[in-house]
Image: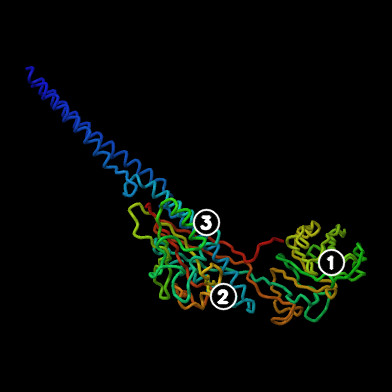
């Protein structure tokens, strides 16, 4: 009996060793599976293609803006040809991008739904007076413009009227060049530019209440002074008085007064189609009114086996400085 | 005698135990190069790293100059081998040094490929950097870049030349969108693996 007991114990030992070995293998395999699952689980939302959409949207936003800027760079065009250039380029982009998306099983369609017709009004000859095409000094650049953007001028200091007057009536009597912004509510802002005897240029702003704000002064660099109405700076320095133009709430007219008493370059973007107005010169002669597609509405559609995505969004050309 | 047999059995049993533990460890082979489940983490990390590098390159505008770093007279990238790609490291451009700093210095090898659309609408691949065939621990990321007709080719020093893609005769990608300002849309792919 004792002999049997011993043999039993030996077998028991062996069986226990086998069981433990199998247990270890099972443990190792289940640990492995847990690690693998955790890894796949933290690998991002591949299932919903969410990151594909986000990237596509990013790419489109950037590339469509680039396309819009390139389309507008070709100035000697009509609105119709700008629009067909934009549509053509966006369609081609969409086709090429779709080729790449097809590899991952998605289809991409981008279409232009609408494009806003704006005008860039500008004068590029720095030695020309700020008059209209016929040479008139008091003239209107645009009427009923809701958006006036990137409005900047570089004016020769010695072309400005020299005066020390700091009243509206006095500046008008001396014939100081001024920009007039009149909105539909009848509010009027006037920005006067004149030169002082010491050679500095001062910018006076008459706000909607008829008060003349304290002048901003600037020393000319290379004989010119840069006035940026959109960012409210004169010669690169902030001019708080100009910021009051931002309070405009309705569409406005922009005019020049005594434009013959200033020479220089200027440029502004308005959300109106004034191309071909009599105030402007024919193609290539100052002042120019050039067609611009400032803002475009696009539609992006992306379809995969388990995702249907559609988004309408807007792109703008230009630096986006508001006002 | 019986005691000896028992001792022998005990030895055999413990050997069996150790052997099964060793076997269990071998099942989850944790070597840096084998595509085991444990290397998933490495792949994930490398994928994120390469993705980060490409994102940086897109946002600081260093991706496109490398695609346009083209020797027009030779029809290859500047300083590339006879086969037309770089083998020992990145191109001598900002993107190249970015890849060197973030990948090579961490002992991660990479291939950089550009996939473009041909005039007939097929996809074709151009190798920019080819360090070899990847090991099992491999991850790939890609970003899409649009080339325009008026994009200019860069010279050996990395400065833009006046030559636009439209007027280039040897550039690897063709104008896949004639009659529009778009030249081609290319997919830049970085394949990374642990050395």
Callout 1: helix, strand or loop? strand
Q: Position of residue A284 (x, y in %)?
A: 70, 81
| Left or right, A172 with reference to B16 | right
Residue under label 3, please give it: B56
Colouring convention used in this rendered image of the protein: rainbow
**Does the residue at mark 1 contact the one at mark 2 (Cβ under 8 Å)?**
no
Disc sitting over residue A37 in the figure: none
Residue B82 vertical position relative to residue B27 in the rendered view, above or below? below
Residue that label 1 marks: A193
- The residue at the point 59 percent across, 67 percent down is A296
Closer to the chain start, of discs 2 and 3, is 3
Which picture quadrant has residue B135? bottom left
Instruction: Say if labels 2 and 3 share a chain.
Output: yes
Q: CA distance from mark 1 to mark 3?
A: 46 Å
In this image, B117 relative to A161: left or right? left
Q: Is residue B114 left or right of residue A315?
A: left
Foreground of the two, A165 or A213: A165
Please name whichever residue, A40 or A50, is drawn nearer the observer in this view of the structure: A40
Q: Position of residue B81 (x, y in %)?
A: 40, 68
Q: CA distance from mark 1 to mark 2?
A: 41 Å
Characterize the local packing of mark 2: few (<14), some (14-19) or many (20 or more) Cα atoms within 10 angstroms. few
């Amino acid at each position: 009996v004792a002999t049997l007991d011993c043999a039993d114990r030996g077998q028991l030992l062996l069986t226990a060793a086998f069981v433990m070995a199998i247990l270890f293998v099972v443990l190792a395999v289940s640990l492995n599976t847990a690690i693998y699952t955790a890894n796949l689980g933290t690998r991002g939302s591949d299932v919903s293609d969410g990151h594909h959409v986000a990237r596509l949207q990013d790419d489109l936003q950037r590339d469509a803006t680039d396309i819009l800027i390139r389309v507008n760079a070709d100035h000697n065009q009509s609105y119709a040809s700008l629009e067909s250039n934009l549509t053509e380029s966006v369609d081609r982009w969409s086709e090429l991008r779709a080729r790449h998306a097809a590899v991952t099983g998605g289809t991409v369609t981008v279409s232009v739904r609408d494009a806003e017709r704006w005008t860039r009004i500008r004068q590029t000859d720095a030695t020309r007076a700020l008059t209209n095409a016929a040479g008139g000094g008091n003239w209107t650049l645009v009427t009923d413009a809701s958006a006036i953007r990137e409005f900047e001028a570089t004016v020769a200091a010695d072309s400005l009227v020299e005066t020390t007057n700091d009243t509206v009536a006095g500046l008008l009597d001396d014939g100081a060049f001024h920009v007039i912004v009149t909105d539909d509510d009848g509010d009027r802002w006037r920005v006067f530019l004149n030169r002082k005897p010491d050679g500095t240029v001062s910018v006076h702003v008459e706000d909607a209440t008829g008060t003349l704000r304290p002048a901003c002064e600037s020393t000319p660099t290379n004989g010119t002074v840069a006035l940026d109405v959109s960012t409210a700076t004169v010669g690169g320095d902030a001019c708080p008085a100009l910021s009051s133009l931002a309070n405009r709430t309705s569409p406005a007219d922009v005019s020049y007064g005594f434009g013959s008493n200033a020479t220089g370059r200027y440029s502004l973007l308005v959300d109106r189609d004034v191309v071909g107005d009599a105030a402007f010169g024919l193609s290539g002669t100052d002042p120019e009114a050039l067609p611009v597609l400032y803002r475009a509405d696009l539609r992006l559609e992306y379809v995969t086996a388990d995702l249907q995505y559609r988004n309408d969004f807007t792109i703008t050309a230009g630096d986006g400085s508001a006002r | 005698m019986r005691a000896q047999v028992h001792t022998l059995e005990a030895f055999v049993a413990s050997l069996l135990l150790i052997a099964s533990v060793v076997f269990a460890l071998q099942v989850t082979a944790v070597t840096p190069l084998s595509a085991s489940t444990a290397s998933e983490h490495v792949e994930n990390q490398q994928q994120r790293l390469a993705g980060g590098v490409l994102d940086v390159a897109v946002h600081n505008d260093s991706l496109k100059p490398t695609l346009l770093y083209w020797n027009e007279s030779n029809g290859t990238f500047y300083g590339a081998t006879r086969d037309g790609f770089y083998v020992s490291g990145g191109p001598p451009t900002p993107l190249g040094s970015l890849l060197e700093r973030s990948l090579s210095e961490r002992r991660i090898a990479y291939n950089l490929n550009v996939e473009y659309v041909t005039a007939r609408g097929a996809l074709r691949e151009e190798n920019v950097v080819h360090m070899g065939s990847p090991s099992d621990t491999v991850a790939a990321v890609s970003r899409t870049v649009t080339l325009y007709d008026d994009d200019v080719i860069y010279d050996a020093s990395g400065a833009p030349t006046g030559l636009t893609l439209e007027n280039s005769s040897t550039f690897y990608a063709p104008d896949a969108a004639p009659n529009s300002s778009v030249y081609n849309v290319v997919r830049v792919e970085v394949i990374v693996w642990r050395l």
